[in-house]
Image: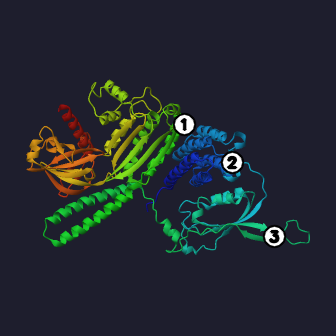
Amino acid sequence: MNTMDPIQVFRTEAAELFEQIESGLLDLLHDLSNQDQIDAVFRGLHTLKGSGAMFGFEALAAFTHHCESAFDRVRKGEVQATSELVAAVLEAQDHMKALVEKPNGDHDDMSQKLLAKLHAAVGGKNGHVAASQPTAPASIAVAAAKTASTNWSIKFRLPDNAMANGTNPLGLLDELRELGECTITVDASTIPGLAEIDPTTLYLGWTIALETEQPRSAIEDVFIFVMDDMQLEITEIKAAASTEQAPNQTAPELVAEPVAEKKQATTNTGPADAKSNKSAENVRVPAERLDELMDRVGELVIAQSRLSQLANISANIQLRSVSEDVERLSGELRDTMMVLRMVPVGSLFGRFRRLVHDLARETGKTIELETEGETTEVDKTVIERLADPLVHLVRNSCDHGLEPPEERRAAGKSPQGRILLSARQQAGEVIITIKDDGRGINRDRVRAKAEASGLIQPNAVLSDQELLQLIFQPGFSTAQEVTNLSGRGVGMDVVKRTIDTLRGTINVVSHPGEGSEVSLSIPLTLAIIDGLLVRVGNGRYVIPLSAVEECLELSVEDDMRSRGRSFISLRDSLVPYLRLRELFRTGSKPDPFQKVVVISTGSERVGLVVDQIIGDHQTVIKAMSKLHHDVATFSGATILGDGDVALILDVGHLVLEGQKQEAHLRAAG
């Protein structure tokens, strides 16, 4: 039986908790009095501490306890939430991540340094964070006003699969003992006979009589990690009469007064259990299994294409019928598989809130990050590979783009800079835009730097887009000095190389004094695309269908008339075109009636002259070999139904070639 490593499961869940805590902290910065966000951060820290202790991450649990204690004081109104406290906990969270990744490392010095910052953030002496008892619950880790003891009756039963999922009831009982004097009684009434016992099932329940000075919320905090999936009943026990009785009086009668509704359990009682059905809706699957399944689906699409080709040349009606069924089913399976791999781009955007917060503190600027289109879905592989380019672009906007507050005031702007991250789908691509309202790109400085570096000749004629694209050249930087953020000229080069490997394009728009906008056009998926299969000479090629605008016929007369100019008139505008036969050096004569396939990226268009348009094709993308990685005209290859290989054209590169040809012809004319 293949079971997942429980430590790895905890690390995955801890990563999700870190995201929740960080998101809550950054939201709290906008309104430091928001009680909902304070409670959310406290719950996240409490859950992280409890689950860390459960899986043996004692150092993590002990350190997290201090942050939890600080937020418990904020939650109870003993201290106010401040930006210093948020910054201290954010920095502490980075240390928690290190404690998760390397639990046996030497972290003592860093722990003490961060605890000192946390101690100062909650008010010095009165803000003591209970360092002497790192494993005690947050509710008793801080000084509080002395209150009268209260008696509670607590009954709870965990789900049948609780221990199999990593929940240890003994840890819950230990936390209850730390709240006060308690008597624990075990309910073993549901234990079956020995022959029927399942060793992975939890059959026990518990009843606890607790006397504590802590409020009911402290008891609920013990169960906060498992409360939604358990039976829990908390009842306050009040005396019916005064406890000062005459010697001949009997002891006072105790009356139970329920103060909380019973939490219904998620137990495996049968198929009709709604909660069990809801829990089964989500299944955690390792990403590599999805990748393997995607590879199998790709092979199936290729096999289906071969079957369709055989069926089309066969007179067997039954074979054609089976081929059509297989084509339909493989198409549905492909679409389902593509949806499984899609994740919202918001999971990527969320990472940059912390980055912008830290950069604002480092640069002394006031920066607001806004996001749009977080629900836009992209292939998970694309999301993973976009992280680094977006980091460089956001850092560049914060450092180079946005001005310091005093400079913005002098320019009549708000002292607070603004960065917008947005995403939207357009045909088979996702457009991700990074926009700032800063000073814009200094074109004179870019040209001077490019000429000094030998990238362009002095006084070379360049279009505005060509000039702006120079910032993506290796080693290019307009920074006056090297800092922790920029100046080495490697960041934007990383952006360009990564987007090229994703078969994407970059468009830059900048207005002096108003800001800059960088748009990344990326295919929604890197696995299977819809393509247009064309023939050039004796070779067949695939053009991504998402880039195709329209197809036109180019007669021999039109071809001869345009020799030396290579332009076609398309609705009152001239569109340059490339003869792929000449570009690929096929050595063959053109067909009598050639076709022009007009493709575009953004606002730029170019025509591709081909001999024949064969039709649409489900294209399973195969990577080029290392020997061909520098062939810029092609972005990959695919296997056709007859077993031949067809190369996939790189649309971005061809459009750029068309622009260069247009600029050359215009200059010559």
Q: Amino acid at mark 2?
A: Gln
Judged by depth in the image, the label closer to the viewer, 3 or 2, is 3
Looking at the picture, how far across and down is residue 46, in whole percent? Answer: 61, 53
The one of 168 and 139 positioned closer to us in this rendering: 139
The three-letter amino acid code for the residue at tag 3 is Ala
Which sits earlier in the primary sequence, circle 3 or circle 1?
Answer: 3
Q: CA distance from mark 3 to mark 1?
A: 59 Å
The image shows residue 366 at horizontal and vertical percentages of 53, 38
User: Cα distance, mark 3 to mark 2?
Assistant: 37 Å
Viewer-proximal residue among 28 and 257: 28
**Callout 3: SS:** loop
Q: Are marks 1 and 2 in contact (CB under 8 Å)?
A: no
Drawn side of residue 125 relative to residue 89, left or right? right
Q: Quadrant of residue 330?
A: bottom left
Q: Which mark is residue 361?
A: 1
Q: Secondary structure at mark 1?
A: helix
Q: How many discs mark residues in the rendered view?
A: 3
Check disc 2 and report its element: helix, strand or loop: loop
Sequence-first disc among 3 and 2: 2
In the image, what residue type sits under mark 1?
Arg
Looking at the image, residue 379 lies above or below residue 466: below
Mark 3 is surrounded, within 10 Å at the Cα level, by few (under 14), some (14 to 19) or many (20 or more) other residues, namely few
- For disc 2, the marked residue is 133
Image quarter hosting the C terminus: top left
Q: CA distance from mark 1 to mark 2?
A: 33 Å
The x, y position of residue 209, in whole percent, is 73, 65
